[in-house]
Image: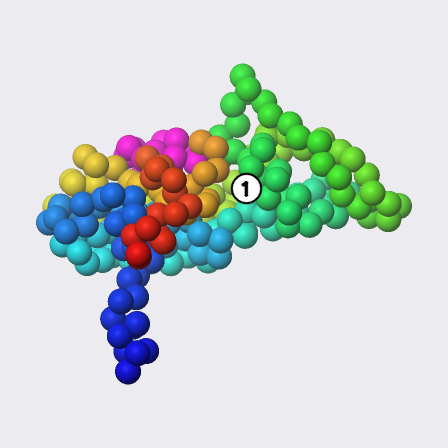
Amino acid sequence: ESAGANKALLLEEPMAAAIGAGLPVHEASGSMVVDIGGGTTEIAVIALSGCVYADSIRIGGDVFDEAIITHVRRTHGCVIGETTAERIKTEVGTAIEDPENPLEVEVRGRSMAEGVPKSFVVTSAEIQKALSDPITGIISGVKAALEQTPPELSADIAERGIVLTGGGALLRNLDELISRETGLPVTVAEDPLTCVSRGGG
């Protein structure tokens, strides 16, 4: 019986993220939330406390890390672990490279040729290229959601914009790139990492 009660309380993640981000989910007007988690990105259009449209794509922060690990192996001939990939993502990861402010970070990996530890420098321009495929996948998902949204709710979203939540929302300039690709305003929720837990609690 307790399992049944728990089931009733389980909010769909995008709804919890929207509540946590302070979106007016109970109103008739539409809100769009893009929750970029570790394993998946949940995209939802919400109105009157329900999901009008919801989709889940298997791209998230973990895929970003894998793309960085693959890039480092191919470009620098070094093997790095997830912790180092995370550090690269946090320090120099970006969705749009800013030539005025290039970023770089020195990291250590294991040289595939010699099998010994090796230091090397990774730049934001490299990582922007490495992440372009997974980011394009997320943007395609957002565009598909916009195409499926009823016209009256589309007008609300055009006015209000899209809210990004989840750890992936912290990637530099991702909001700007999604805005550029969709023509809509995009904002990152305050403290995006805790939106789902705040909204669900």
Look at the image and give the residue range highlighted in magenta.
174-186
The picture places residue 165, in percent across and down from the top left corner, at 37, 45
The picture places residue 106, in percent across and down from the top left corner, at 71, 31
Q: Which amino acid does the dot numbered 1 rest on?
A: Leu
The picture places residue 118, in percent across and down from the top left corner, at 81, 39
Q: Residue at x 26, y 46 (%)?
A: 32
Q: Which residue is mark 1?
A: 131
Image quarter of residue 10: bottom left
- The C terminus lies in quadrant: bottom left
As for residue 83 lying within the magenta part, the answer is no
Please tell me whether the stretch drawn in magenta is mainly helix, strand or loop: helix
Q: Residue at x 34, y 39 (%)?
A: 189
- Residues 186 and 6: in front is 6
Seen in the image, is 145 located left or right of residue 191? Answer: left
Q: Is residue 87 above or below residue 13?
A: above
- Residues 16 and 76: in front is 16
Q: Residue at x 25, y 43 (%)?
A: 22
Q: Residue at x 78, y 35 (%)?
A: 119
